[in-house]
Image (cartoon, grey):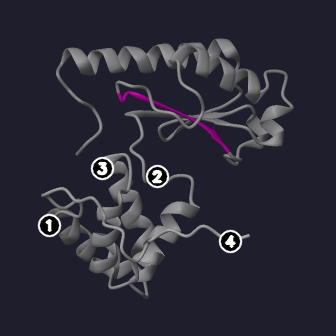
Amino acid sequence: MAWPTKPSATMQVPRRAEPYATAAMKARWTADVLPKYATRLGALMPILHDVQHAYRHVPYQAQLEIAEFLGISPADVLDTVSFYDEFTIEERGVMTIGVCHSIACEQCTCSSTKLLERARERLGIAAGETSDDGRFTLLAMDCLGSCDTAPVALFNETLHEQLTVEKLDKLIDQAQAGAQADTKHGTPGGHH
């Protein structure tokens, strides 16, 4: 049996005209981030967080720009982006809803499976998908570190604890109302 290979050495990274790592970002990283770390590699995680927050993903072009800025291998950047759940190469929705599906959240009266299924029904997308309008991404996440308040879910970066289907419905209602308000005011929501 032969292992299939990818022509990674000859693959082209899709590029847009303007850089993801803007001059303002690089200036901020140089002034605020780099001085906190003994090595430039140490600054990788906060820089990736900055890019993820700004664009809702860390595209390959941005990874190359970050590698060049830090003077590290692009493979180090890709390894980090692909290892951690909070980073993604595919653009996420304006609102990312992450339902914890650890054992503690699953064993509660209102299991994480029930919550995930309800979110799927309400949003019309499966875990790992983004709505066609780009407003919502639904994720099944590994432990969020709040087992004593299970079941839990993240709405962007806000943790909601001791969830029930009813509480989840209210949170989704609020998120959808916020998305509607953004649309009415012409705010695409998300990109800085």
Among the two numbered marks 3 and 4 on one chain, the one whose residue lies closer to the N terminus? 4
Among the two numbered marks 1 and 4 on one chain, the one whose residue lies closer to the N terminus? 4
Q: Quadrant of the N terminus?
A: bottom right
Task: Specify few, some or many for label 4: CA neighbours under 10 Å numbering under 14, 14-19, or 20 or more.
Answer: few
**Percent x, y of residue 83:** 58, 63
Query: Which residue type carries mark 2?
Result: Thr
Q: Which residue lies under the disc numbered 2?
A: 88
Badge 3 element: helix
**Percent x, y of residue 162:** 71, 27
Q: CA distance from mark 2 to mark 4?
A: 30 Å
Among the two numbered marks 2 and 4 on one chain, the one whose residue lies closer to the N terminus? 4
Instruction: Please give the label number shown on residue 23.
Output: 1
Q: CA distance from mark 2 to mark 1?
A: 23 Å
Query: Which residue type carries mark 3?
Result: Ala
User: In the image, is residue 159 above or below residue 13?
Assistant: above
> What residue is rendered at 73% in x and 31% in y?
151
User: In the image, is residue 33 above or below residue 135?
Assistant: below
**Percent x, y of residue 117:** 68, 21
> What residue is rendered at 71% in x and 43% in y?
146
Q: CA distance from mark 1 to mark 3?
A: 14 Å
Q: Nearer the viewer, mark 3 or mark 2?
A: 2
Task: Specify few, some or many for label 3: CA neighbours under 10 Å numbering under 14, 14-19, or 20 or more.
Answer: some
User: In the image, is residue 191 above or below residue 70?
Assistant: above
Q: Nearer the viewer, mark 2 or mark 1?
A: 2
Badge 1 element: helix
Q: Which residue lies under the disc numbered 3?
A: 54
Q: Nearer the viewer, mark 2 or mark 4?
A: 4
**Percent x, y of residue 79:** 52, 70
Q: Quadrant of residue 182?
A: top left
Badge 2 element: loop
The stretch of residues the image draws in magenta is: 134-141
